[in-house]
Image: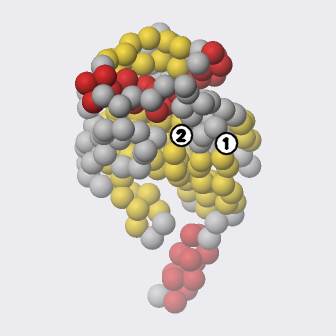
Amino acid sequence: AAAWTVWDRWQAQPVFAQTFSTPRGARQEVSLPDGSRLQLDVATRLEVIYRRHQRQVRLVEGEALFDVRSDPAVPFEVLAGPAWVRVVGTRFAVRYIPDLPVDTEVAVAVEAGVVRVARATVTGGRAERADSQTVLLSAGQRVALDAAGTHGPVSAVAGTGVAPWRQHRVAFDNQRLDRVLAQLARYGDLPWRVQDPAVAALRVTGVFDPRDL
């Protein structure tokens, strides 16, 4: 029993741990020790922890594109608020902005490969599925989870792609105006303030260039 405890603790020790963040209006590309690559959008913060049997990223806020090097023996997991995502080797984007007006959601969109998405819990620093309601996403599909971790229907990725910010585009589909402005404010100062609740609830659909707010 003692030997098993020592071995388990040895397995759980991080072999790589680092935090990456981008300020408002700036992006960053990161290479990880296993060859995986991350692209961080503006105002994004994430924590990377690699253990001998697990690769894990916690997206604290913002949006990132993950290009994961395949290693079936060491799964790659992403925690983003109430969402748990596991992959073997694929390319996908996750968005989690907890301070947006009204409801917070986590969006997962797949560009290549397959990912599993479920409601998350964390036990002893390790990500675990909270239930068996796993959603399987393949290339060209996306899903959103609400603040409680309940997922909506699987839908097709919009024509702008899984991470339109790579081409300096921000896309909104029937979003409240206050949410749109809050997301655009991550790219730079905005000259507008909304004080009327009826105006804040107006719906916006469109693709915008955040360099020309």
Instruction: Name the one closer to the observer, 82 or 89.
Output: 82
> Which amino acid lies under the numbered mark 1 shown in the image of this protein?
Thr
- The residue furthest front is 195
Callout 1 secondary element: loop
Residue denoted by label 1: 22
Horizontal and vertical percent for residue 34? 71, 46
In the depicted structure, whether residue 14 falls above or below residue 62: below
Residue at the spot x=71%, y=46% of the render?
32
Where residue 7 is drawn, which disc sits there? none
Q: Is residue 46 left or right of residue 123?
A: right
Whether residue 158 is visible:
yes
Callout 2 secondary element: strand
Residue at the spot x=55%, y=25% of the render?
191
Q: Is residue 54 left or right of residue 151?
A: right
Q: Label 1 vs label 2: CA separation? A: 9 Å
Q: Earlier in the sequence, mark 1 or mark 2?
A: 1
Residue denoted by label 2: 62
Instruction: Name the one closer to the observer, 16 or 54.
Output: 16
Label 1 close to label 2 by CB (< 8 Å)? yes
Instruction: Name the one closer to the observer, 44 or 117.
Output: 44
Residue at the spot x=41%, y=62% of the render?
122
